Image (tube, rainbow, N blue to C red):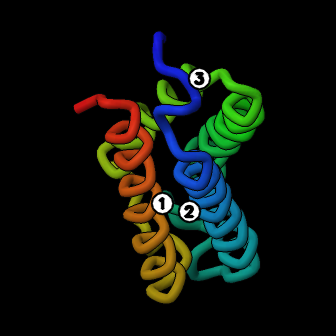
Amino acid sequence: MAETQSSIPQPVGERFAKTFDAFVAAVRAAVKEAAQKPEFAGAAAFCAWRDRALPLLEQENASIQSALAQFLVGQSGPIIRLARDAGGLAKNLDGFPLDFAGADHADILDQLETAVVVTAYQVCAAAGLP
């Protein structure tokens, strides 16, 4: 991509990466806690998060953190591409109910999921993308 780091304020790129990392950490914590509770641990929703969603989110997070490092040295293309993808996070997680570990975790995950989408949009908007 032709965008340069200067088109995206550094705090915007950093906030996106930090927010995605916080979302993944919250999913990881919810999975860990739900695994200890029989009422959640045997549920299909829990298994889907543990076996499919979390590993994919962890891979995506690793890519975003790497893209942040590239962004900080002037290469904005990777973080813009990943932000564009993350803008569809809620849609990508359709079929993965956020309440797999209970209502308290669902509220936190919902807030963080929304924050990821918002910060991804901010990166894209700063780069001039629709």
Amino acid marked by disc 1: Ala
Horizontal side, residue 67 vs residue 100: left or right: right
Q: Is residue 38 above or below residue 60?
A: below
- Residue 51's image quarter? top right
Q: Which residue is mark 3?
A: 78
| Image location of residue 92, percent across then percent down | 37, 41
Q: Is residue 91 above or below residue 130?
A: below
| Image location of residue 34, percent across then percent down | 66, 75
Q: Nearer the viewer, residue 10 or 48?
A: 10
Q: Assign a secondary structure to mark 3.
A: helix
Q: Which residue is mark 2?
A: 46
Q: Is residue 43 above or below residue 67?
A: below
- Residue 107's image quarter? bottom left
Any part of residue 59 in sight: no
Residue at mark 1 to residue at mark 2: CA–CA distance: 4 Å
| Image location of residue 88, percent across then percent down | 34, 41
Residue farthest toward the bottom in the current orientation of the protein: 104
Q: Assign a secondary structure to mark 2.
A: helix
* Residue drawn where x is 76% and y is 28% of the image: 73
* Residue drawn where x is 65% and y is 37% of the image: 64
Amino acid marked by disc 2: Phe
